[in-house]
Structures are given as C-alpha cells and as structure tokens.
Amino acid sequence: MHSPDILYCLETIGIVAFALSGMIVARKANMDPVGIFAIAFVTALGGGTLRDLILDNHPLYWINHQEMPVLILVMTLLFTCFRPLSRLRESNIVLPDAIGLGVFSILGAQFALDQGHSWFIASLLGVITGTFGGALRDTLCNEVPFIFRKDQIYASISFAGCWLYFVCRWALANDTLALAIGLLFIVAIRLLAVHFDIRLQRDAEAHG
Amino acid sequence: MHSPDILYCLETIGIVAFALSGMIVARKANMDPVGIFAIAFVTALGGGTLRDLILDNHPLYWINHQEMPVLILVMTLLFTCFRPLSRLRESNIVLPDAIGLGVFSILGAQFALDQGHSWFIASLLGVITGTFGGALRDTLCNEVPFIFRKDQIYASISFAGCWLYFVCRWALANDTLALAIGLLFIVAIRLLAVHFDIRLQRDAEAHG
Amino acid sequence: MHSPDILYCLETIGIVAFALSGMIVARKANMDPVGIFAIAFVTALGGGTLRDLILDNHPLYWINHQEMPVLILVMTLLFTCFRPLSRLRESNIVLPDAIGLGVFSILGAQFALDQGHSWFIASLLGVITGTFGGALRDTLCNEVPFIFRKDQIYASISFAGCWLYFVCRWALANDTLALAIGLLFIVAIRLLAVHFDIRLQRDAEAHG
C-alpha cells in the first residue's frame, strides 16, 4: 500500500493542473472572474464528483477537503490579478490537461479497485474520472471536448494507462510504483500524441 | 410477478438497441472508435444511471452487471470493423431508438413502482429513464434531442405508455402481460408517429 | 429555528418562480407543451436535485413532495392554454428568475449549514442550488447561461447573499429573520444589477 500522503499530494497536483487548464479556457472564452472560478471548479472537481456519485462514496471529496475549493478560489484570484499568469495562452493548456488526465485516471481506477471492483469496471471509472472534468470545461466554454475530437487520441490513453497500472500493481506488488508508472505513461503518451499528432483514424477513412 | 429473467432479457434488448442508435449517430458525427464507444455507452446506460442516482439505488446497474459495458465494447468493435453494420444510416436509427425508449420507459416505471412510489412519480421516472440516454446522445453529437424537437411526439408517448402499463398491471394483476402491453404501445406509437409525422403542435400555432 | 411551514412556503415560491421562467424561455425557443413542461421541471427542480445528490440526501425533494411536479404540470397546462400567461415575454423572465435565485441560494445554504457543513461549503452549495436550474434551462434552450454571461453579475450576488445570511444568522440568533434578509438582498441586488447593468468586468478590460 502507498501512504495516504502520496495520494493526497497527487490529488492536489491533479486539481491544480485541471483548475489551471479550466482558467485558461475560461479566459479565452472571455468570462468574468466568477465564470473563471466556476469553470476551474467544475474542471478540477467534476471528474471526482461523478466518480463519487457513481460509487456512492459520501461525503464527496471536495466537501470533505474544503481546502480544495479554497485553493481554486485563491488560484482564480491570482490568475485574474497577476499579469504573467493571465498571459497564459491556449497552447499552454496541453501540459496541465495531460497531468490532470493522468492523475485523475489513475486515482479513479485505484479508488474503484480498492473498493473491490473488477479491472474492467475500474478502468471505465478511471477514464470517466480522468475525462469528465475536461469534457465539462470544453462543453461549457463551447469547445468540442478532447474526448470527442478526432484530432488526437485522448480517452484511449487514459484507458491504456489504467490497464498498465493494473498489470504493474499485480506484477510488482507495489502500488506506489505502479501508480507512478501508469501516471507517467498517460502524461508522456498524451504529450507525444499532441506533438506528433497521433490519431486513431485518418480523415480519409472517416469519410470512406 | 414476472421472473427476473424476463427483466434481464428486456434490459439487454434495450441496451443493445440504444447502443446501436448511439453508434449510428456517433458515426454520422464522424467520431473515432473511442468516441463511438463513449456515445454508445452513455446512450445505453445513461438513463438507467440517472434513474439509479435519483432513487439512490446502488451499486448502479452497469457496475453490478459488467457484462453490459463489455457487450457495448464488443458491439463497437463489430460496428467499426464489420462493413455491413457500418453502412447503417441515420434513417436506421428510428427502430432501435423506439425500442430503447419503450424498454427503458417501462422498466424505469416498473422499478420505481416496485420501490413503493406513486403512479405519478413512477411515470416521471419512466420518462426520465427512457429519454435521458437519447438526449445525452443527441446533445453530445450536436443534434437537437428528440425530446426537445417539435417535429414528432416523443416524451408524451413514453408518459402515456407508462400510464397504460400501470392501468393494465392494476386491472390484469399480471405484471408480465402489462409490461408487454406498455412496451409494445410505446414502440408502435413512436413508429407510427415518425411515419405519419404526428405532432403536438402545428408550426402555424407555434408562431401564432 | 424557523418553522418547517416557512421553509415549505419559500420552497413553493421558488419552484413557481423558476418554473415560470423556464416556461417563458421554452416558449421563446418554440417548444411544444411537453418540452415546456420538461424545461419548467428541470429549471425548478434541477438545483435542489443536484444539492440533494451532492449531500446524499434521499429521497430527493420532489420525490418526497410529489405535489411539486403536479404543480408544475398544472402550471404548464395553464401557461399553454391561457392566453394572458402565454403573452409573457423574455423581458418578464427577470423577476421570477431573481426570486428563484434568491430562494434557492438561501435554502441551499441553510440546508447545508443545518447538516453541519462549514460556511464556505454551505455558500458553495447555495450558489450551486441557486444557479444550476437556470443554467440547465438556458443550456437546453440554446442560450448562454446567466452564470457564464459577462453582461451582469449573477453568481456573485448569490454568493454574497449566502454570506450575509450566515452573518445575520450568527449575529441575530434568529434564522427566519436572517433568511428573509439574505433572500431580499439577493432579489433586490439582482434586479438592480439588471436595471443599472452592473458588471464585474468591463468589455475594455476583457479584451485588454
């Protein structure tokens, strides 16, 4: 078993990363500070909330850890007042989004596994936890969500990373190491996919 | 009482029908295989998930019956690889959508009734269970959901079918027969409504 | 403590106000009677449903109080059949929307507080309860939700009103009076904000 401290650190990293990605997209959509906070909130906490509702896990993570909404509030204030942060552009979204995807996919899968669910159900919950916050963000800001865009692989990386984590956890009998491998796999492959423009389907096929 | 086997068969038929309708719409929206699976998943399981969350019925249906997400995964693989299936067009959506609407409306109403809710609450849950999956499918694929389209009646058929089921169940004291009557009513009327273009409101009135 | 009767009256006022706002927007979007009922239903009951799901409070309000969905059904029939009501225009939405925002924000916050949550968490739940129904209404009718519009303050009023309610409740030791102050504050400031076009951010800044 990994210690709760590691999980808590990871959770915080994921929330900061997704909140940042939410603020960047909300700013581009020209929202006021309240809108920016709302988008950061649903991006960072939406995936975990859906996971907790699906698994009937109460109280919800952010109600139990109210420092997380406070953190997002402070980040929003910094983001809207502090010039260098507000200069972040849409291209800067790729790294925080990849980190958030990796952290929440693996944590969602690990949480479902610890509750006794099968690898398959746990991988579905990993994908749901990892992608739902970003999908809400993009829908509310009138973008096509990454998960439904054809231009790069997204949900499949989350799915593959969850299974890699399961195999490592089973083979290595070391959950912390397995967690790190799965997480780094998702972040690295997602960044490579964006950089080299890897797709599941070529346009020619799509129209064929 | 009807046997659990009949309910399980119906549930499976509804899931296959709605998953198929989701795959057809997703393909038309030009999604890659992962997007097609995601749309098929939320179309087939979205209504039941919302019903279970509203009624606090845990674990959710698809977590308890993990063969259903597996079935949708297999259907997606067949659909994307097997030529004749991928030739299905948007006009082919009407039949599976009507079957899914009928099955989930009646099963949602029956489930709420068995939990001791009133006919009125049970009929609302029937409509929610029957229409939510398709509404998610259409929203995510950028279509106006059937339930909000004026061109044909949709939710009202589901509502009427639920009440027909209640009356038959009460009058016949045979749940299986009542279930069949309600279900066939919804499927038949929905197909007739599409064929004869039956509406609640004429355009002239709408603008009047 | 205030009596349950006062809470019940407020809840009813909020539901009627939000249902009316939903019917006006749905009519403008040219929906048929079933669509008008569906929009009125999610506008009036969406915020409370999300609050109850987040706080794991079952059965949901409208399942326990089935007179509320019946009331919305009757209102829809009146609205679609009775000429003077159907002459209500989009500009008439401001008052019912402000009343619904005020009632549900304060009731959401009060409910969370009574369950033992902190002021901060309770204020977030107040904002969620107060704004979610209207956000669903606007999204389903293809409008940009008030909460994400830059043209007037909306969610910030709800947030400020919740904190005013907390301070009054703590200072006055009279929950009913505090409730009234918070509620009237939200409704009054929202109406003033629309009338004098108060914003958090000027357009010039937004583009700067």
Image (spheres, coloured by chain):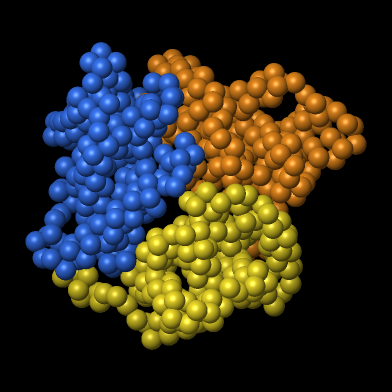
Chain colours: A blue, B orange, C yellow
Position in image of residue C185 (x %, y %)? 46, 81
Q: Is residue A111 above or below residue C53?
A: above
Position of residue A198 in the picture relative to residue C53 (left or right) = left
Q: Which of C46 and A204 is in front in this view?
A: C46
Residue at image location 31% in from the left, 45% down from the top: A134
Position in image of residue A157 (x %, y %)? 27, 28
> Can residue A70 be seen in this snapshot?
yes
Q: Which of B205 and B160 is in front in this view?
A: B160
Position in image of residue B51 (x %, y %)? 60, 41
Q: Image quadrant of residue B34?
A: top left
Q: Is residue B137 above or below residue A172?
A: below
Quarter of the figure that contains the N terminus of chain A: top left
Total residue callouts:
0
Report the residue that reaches farthest toward the right. Answer: B171
Q: Image quadrant of residue B77?
A: top left
> Can residue C95 be seen in this snapshot?
no
Residue at image location 37% in from the left, 82% down from the top: C197
Position in image of residue C119 (x %, y %)? 40, 66
Position of residue B156 in the picture relative to residue B177 (left or right) = left
Residue at image location 73% in from the left, 60% down from the top: C67
Report the residue that reaches farthest toward the left. Answer: A84
Q: Nearer the viewer, residue A96 or B140?
A: A96
Residue at image location 87% in from the left, 37% down from the top: B170
Quarter of the figure that contains the C terminus of chain A: top left
